[in-house]
Image (cartoon, grey):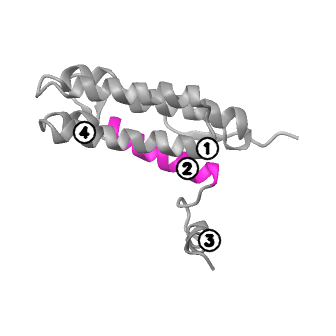
Amino acid sequence: MPIGDHFDRMTDRVPGLGRDPASVRRRIEHAERLLEGLFVVPVLNRPMGLDVILDVVPGIGPITAATLGGWIVWEARNLGMSKWQMARMAGNVGIDLLLGAIPWIGAIPDFFFRSNTMNLKMIKRHLDRHHPELATIEGDAKRIRRAPGP
């Protein structure tokens, strides 16, 4: 048995590790939350995550944040998103990298330009269109799973 087949069978048994759209959606949502909304800045009442924090570390920080953002784009490729969508998402990550590349000061514009959130929205639109059974209605404090259609 090829190693890839064995790995696929193993990941299908562990929730969230499979290649199915629901597992990919959960992973991307968690990655976006980690990168963009880890905690809320008290005075500004605005979420902040690792993406901004890593920008404070010159050189390696923005590259690390862009790599994590690139992983979200790679997961989107696995969902079968179009090349145009992928290019837009890669452009968002590239702009984020350029903004963050300015030592220390780059964290300020990066605080407002949320490339991973924009990419997550694109992925959710794709999933809602192509996998409507996974669509969710997002409310203030909870999520309600939409019932599958006939």
User: Quick one: label 4 or label 1, which is nearer the N terminus?
Assistant: 4
Is residue 4 in the magenta section? Answer: no
Q: Is residue 37 left or right of residue 60?
A: right
Quarter of the picture containing the C terminus is top right
Q: Which mark is residue 24?
A: 2
C-alpha distance separating marks 3 and 4? 33 Å
Is residue 34 in the magenta section? Answer: yes
**Closer to us: 143 or 26:** 26
Q: Position of residue 7 (x, y in %)?
A: 55, 71
Q: Secondary structure at mark 1?
A: loop
Q: Secondary structure at mark 4?
A: helix
Q: Which mark is residue 63?
A: 4
Report the span colored magenta: 20-36
Task: Give me the residue at 11% from left, 28% from top.
Answer: 103
User: Quick one: label 3 or label 4, which is nearer the N terminus?
Assistant: 3
Instruction: Name the chief secondary structure element in magenta.
Output: helix
Which label sits in the foreground, 2 or 4? 4
**Closer to us: 70 or 146:** 70
User: Quick one: label 2 or label 4, which is nearer the N terminus?
Assistant: 2
Q: Are marks 1 and 2 in contact (CB under 8 Å)?
A: yes
Query: Where does label 3 land, which residue?
Result: 5
Task: Give me the residue at 22% from left, 28% from top.
Answer: 100
Query: Where does label 1 land, which residue?
Result: 79
Amino acid at pointer 3: Asp
Q: Position of residue 98 (x, y in %)?
A: 26, 24
Label 3 crowding class (10 Å Cα cut-off): few <14, some 14-19, many 20+? Answer: few
